[in-house]
Amino acid sequence: MPRMNPTWVCGGAALVATAVLRITHYRLLGLIPISELQTLALVGDAVMALGLLVLAVGFRREDSVVGRRPLGVAAVCVFAALPLLITLVNSALSGMDDAGYDVGAMRAAERAAALTFLANVVLTLMSAVLSAAAVAGARTVPSPWNWTPFWALALFMVLGGSIFFNMALVDVWWLHSIAPVMLLGVVILLLGVRRPVSRGTDAGTGRSHGHG
C-alpha cells in the first residue's frame, strides 16, 4: 500500500516553491526596485535551504535521503547554505558600489565579487557532487530515482553550457538555475506522495512483523 512520506513531501514542495519564486524573480527584473528583488531572492534561497535540510536530516532517520550519514548531511548543508550566503554577500557588495562612488571601495568590491564568484562555483560543484553521491549511495530513495541529483546536475551543466555558447538562448539564461531545482522537487514530491510501504512492515509503526 502507498503512504505519504511527510519528509519528502515537505522537502519536495519547498524545492518546487523555490523554482516558482525564482521564475517570479526573473520575470520581475526591471519592473520592481532592486531591494525588493533582493528580498525575493533571499526568500527563495531560504526556502530551498530549508527544503534541502529537511530532506537531508528527515523527520525520521529512515526518511533522510542520505541516510543521515555525516558526510552526506554536511555536503547537503553546504550546498543548501551557499545560495543564501552568496545572495547576502552580493547584496552587501552592491551596497558598497552605491556608497559614495569611492574608486578604492569600488575596486575592492569588484575584487571581492570575483573571489566570491570563484569560491561559489568551486564549493557548489564540490558539494553538489558529494550530495548527489550520498543520495545515490544511501539508497533511501528507490532506484532509479536515487540518481535524480546527478540528472539535475547534468541538466544544469548542459543548459548552462548551451546558453553560454549559443547567444540565441540568452533570453532564457535563467532556466539553468530553475529547471534542475524543479526536477528535484517534482520527483521527490511525487515519491513522497506515492512511496510504498516495504513488505512485512507495519505502515503505522514502521516495525517488521515476525512470522509465526
Image: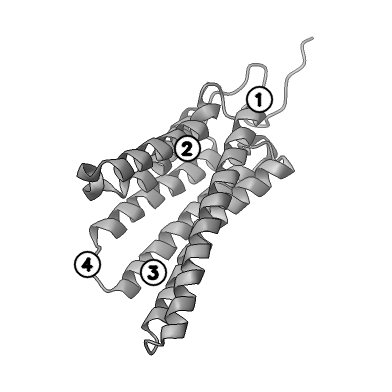
Which one is nearer the viewer's eye here, 67 or 156? 156
Q: Residues within 10 Å of mark 3 (few under 14, many from 20)?
A: some
**Residue position for label 3:** 39
Of tags 2 and 1, the one toward the viewer is: 2
Q: Residues within 10 Å of mark 1 (few under 14, many from 20)?
A: few
Q: Amino acid at mark 1?
A: Asp
At 56% from the left and 24% from the top, the residue drawn is 142
**Residue position for label 4:** 30
- Rounded to the nearest whole Å, what is the CA distance between mark 4 and mark 3? 15 Å
- Rounded to the nearest whole Å, what is the CA distance between mark 2 and mark 4? 29 Å
**Residue position for label 1:** 202
| SS class, disc 1 | loop
- Rounded to the nearest whole Å, what is the CA distance between mark 1 and mark 4? 54 Å
At 33% from the left and 67% from the top, the residue drawn is 37
At 42% from the left and 80% from the top, the residue drawn is 106
Sooner in the amino-acid sequence: mark 1 or mark 4: 4
Q: Amino acid at mark 4?
A: Gly
Sooner in the amino-acid sequence: mark 2 or mark 3: 3
Image quarter where the C terminus lies is: top right
**Residue position for label 2:** 153
Q: In this rendering, would 146 be left or right of 182?
A: right
Q: Residue furthest right?
A: 212
Of tags 2 and 3, the one toward the viewer is: 2
Sooner in the amino-acid sequence: mark 2 or mark 1: 2
- Rounded to the nearest whole Å, what is the CA distance between mark 2 and mark 3? 26 Å
